[in-house]
Image: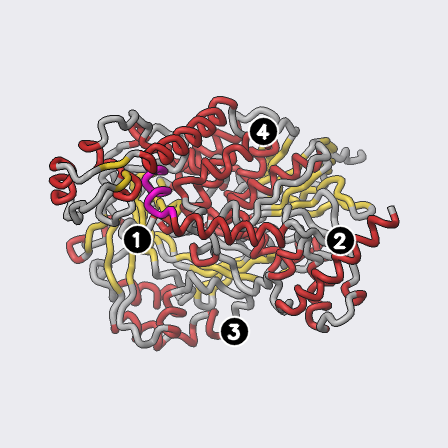
Amino acid sequence: MNKKVIEETYDVVVVGAGHAGCEAALACARLNKKTIIFTVSVESIAMMPCNPNIGGSSKGHLVKEIDALGGEMGINIDHTFIQSKMLNKSKGPAVHSLRAQADKHAYSNRMRQTLENTPNLTIRQGEVTEILVEDGKIYGVKVYSGAVYYCKAVVLCTGTYLNSRCLYGDVIEHTGPNGLRSALALSDSLRKNGIELYRFKTGTPARIDKRSIDFSKMEEQFGDERIVPFSFTTNPDDIQIDQVSCWLTYTNEKTHEIIRENLDRSPMFSGVIEGTGPRYCPSIEDKVVRFADKNRHQVFIEPEGNNTNEMYIGGMSSSLPEDVQYEMYHSVPGLENAQIVRNAYAIEYDCINPNQLLPSLEFKTIQGLFSGGQFNGSSGYEEAACQGLIAGINAARSLDKKEPLILDRSQAYIGVLIDDLVTKETHEPYRMMTSRSEYRLILRQDNADLRLTKIGYEVGLISEERYRWVCEKEELIEKEIARLNEVTIGARTDVQELLTKHNSTPLKTATTLAELIRRPELVYEDLAPIDPDRPNLHPEVIEQVNILVKYDGYISRQYKQVADFKKLENKKLPQDFDYKQIPSLRTEAVQKLNQLQPVSIGQASRISGVSPADISVMLVFFKQYYRNSTKEK
């Protein structure tokens, strides 16, 4: 009897249901594309195999931007967090970053429910083993059973599952994270289609039974008194919950000595691990070696959820043998009797060289093939989710013959991240940081909705009601700032008393309300007693008014820098161009430009090996090149 091969047809196939895959699939389905998402296990949808939190320094910006564009991550964590904290509050608003501890099982379950109840979206458990390409164009995928799923676009979001193996000591398990099956066949199919793969690695610490921890030897870490939501659609009053505490302890010299004595048993140092690990999230053995002068390192004890006793040992990821892990953790104050529920391990996996991608996250050589997340050489849930969202949006737009959505470095942290990945050489898992953004003063998390909601609306992921509120909010902010710059305040008795109360220098001559707000010790709300005509404004409007007035000089200067940046970004370059044609261009620049095929002069200027002198030569050449092209037409 002949075996019948299952064949189905979809608009978009998404491979992988981690944080990138979920956002990609939801974006495609919500843009009315018939979408199917494949996962090695339905139970692993939006799984958090490492740290049980969302957000953090710079990552909080990404989550806010995902939300402003119409993504799901911010909404999902607002419904499933157990502790929330705004980081860097002692610093300026540009680096404020929201971070929330998640109930990781609730987070995964809610995201699964969202996918299951989204029209146009089908969830399928199965391993994709092959991409189907003809004449440089994607036309489907094949799965392990032999079934074929025809489609017009594929989004690869394979995370850390491709040809993955988990290691600790001399133990090697050919699995994905949390013991789930590894995807072994797809890598060969990608190579056959000319895709260059890298070998990266990451790791995770042990999970400890809460009942075996002595919290009296640790410092309790509380959440914020007033919780700020991630999503601009979440009512803050609805999420003021009783929060769960985290705890802080430290390694010590005994811990470090145990690690140093056993480095030869770590697969990372013995040469067993082939992949490159993340520089900014090192294992504890890596930290002990690299920072030999430090006699202690922070260790955060974080709950994994409300309905489990598992505690995450943040700051102590490791691939040391099991017996060494016990000895190492037991040397830490409060963990002397700790019982390990899950061993720490390192995980190696295949990912791509992201220089093979266009800024749209579509492969340069295969039309209709997009990718996002750790498969693109990044690290972190938030980095993955934002790439998945953009890849999904662009997969859907490609089917509608629309121009791709490309956010530049002046528009969003997402733009910075993707530009770095596709332009710069990535030899280790990429992590987003505030320092990577040249324009971070205007790319704050608090104004992500003002920057990106209109774009999300134009794409089709933002409702009319939400769009109208952002337009109204923008108008209210502009009106109030104009009023503050016009209203003059003299040296009245009540004014002087208010200034004295806030330790601010009394007035000698009249000034505007705006000038008073620019004083470091004063904010918009402080001036209410001397400003009887102030309108009754929404807290979000007040927040923006205060920031924009107080930092007006710095922000104006940054917008001028952005204008210069835009000039270079708007100078487009031809694709499949041979840069050997340009006289006086250095050999290294020719090689890099031919390899990466930048889409603009701006992108070319950020390529390692392309100097300012090369850019000057290119500007002169392409001015004449386009002039001649116009004459020929």
Q: Nearer the viewer, mark 3 or mark 1?
A: 1
Vertical placement of 55 versus 457: above or below? below
Tell me the element at label 3.
Answer: loop
Residue at image position (48%, 39%) is: 451
Q: Badge 3 is on which residue?
A: 271
Compared across the picture, whether 501 is left or right of 523 comes to: left
Q: Main secondary structure of the magenta part?
A: helix
Label annotation for residue 575: 2
Q: Badge 4 is on which residue?
A: 460
Front-most of 65 and 173?
65
Tell me the element at label 2.
Answer: loop
The reply to whether callout 2 and callout 4 are in contact (CB within 8 Å) is no
Q: Nearer the viewer, mark 2 or mark 4?
A: 2
Asked if the stretch drawn in magenta spans residue 381, the answer is: no
The reply to whether callout 4 and callout 1 are in contact (CB within 8 Å) is no
Earlier sequence position, callout 2 versus callout 3: 3
The part of the image, by quadrant, that contains residue 1 is top right
Magenta residues span: 543-552
The part of the image, by quadrant, that contains residue 297 is bottom left
Q: Position of residue 27 (x, y in %)?
A: 57, 34
